[in-house]
Amino acid sequence: MLATHEKPDTITLNVGGELFRTRLETLQLVPDSPLGKMFEDNSAYGKLPRDENGVVFFDRDPKAFSSVLDYLRRRCRVIGPPESDALLARVRDEADYFGLVGMMAQLDKETRARKVRNNHHQLINPILQVGAVIKEGLTAMTVMQADQLKATQILNRDIYNIFTN
């Protein structure tokens, strides 16, 4: 049993109605961030809001917050950023809200990389479309040439037969 002056090692958070359990030191991993400071003794943020069960409550996006918590659990590394651009933007917003500058920088880098890939696809797709049209044209020409060759062969055979019979 904890003495009254000891803090528990773990904490449960209610984020947008979804419960998260983590270590207090995980939330304080970036001590200069608002998130880290919220859980300090005598925090400048004062008493944190709580739900009806006494659990610390953040009225935030739980799906995006899970990425924030994952970032902290991985010692400030974004591993496997969100697949969708929409979720990436929401996670970036959560990182900004909680003052996780390092996470914001990593997410911004991912956003820029996606823009480059999208621009690349926008440049390459028309070229691929032109290539497909050229391929169709060449295929059609090849069929026409084959038909012409066959017709020429038949004509030559018929002419040969006329002169040799």
Image (cartoon, helix red, strand yellow):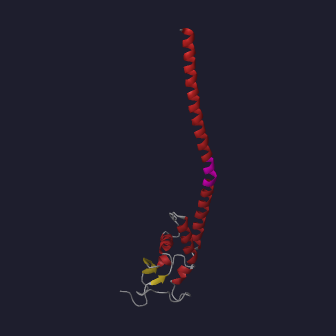
- Magenta includes 123? yes
Give how far across and how far down residue 160 sits, in percent: 56, 13
Give how far across and how far down residue 28 sits, in percent: 51, 78
Observer-nearest residue: 131 or 42?
131
Give how far across and how far down residue 27 sits, in percent: 49, 77
Task: Point out the residue furthest to the left here.
Answer: 1
Quadrant in which the N terminus is drawn: bottom left
Task: Please determine whether, in this image, residue 65 is positioned above or below residue 143.
Answer: below
Residue sitting at 56 percent across and 69 percent down?
89
- Magenta includes 38? no
- Specify the principal SS of the magenta part: helix
Q: Within the image, what quadrant is residue 140 found in?
A: top right
Q: Within the image, what quadrant is residue 138 found in?
A: top right
Total marks shown come to 0
Observer-nearest residue: 143 or 119?
143
Residue sitting at 55 percent across and 24 percent down?
150
Task: Point out the residue furthest to the top here.
Answer: 165
Observer-nearest residue: 125 or 35?
125
Observer-nearest residue: 122 or 133?
133
Task: Please determine whether, in this image, residue 96 is positioned above or below residue 57.
Answer: above
Residue sitting at 59 percent across and 73 percent down?
101
Give how far across and how far down residue 7 sits, in percent: 44, 85
Q: Magenta residues?
A: 121-127
Task: Please determine whether, in this image, residue 11 is positioned above or below residue 78.
Answer: below
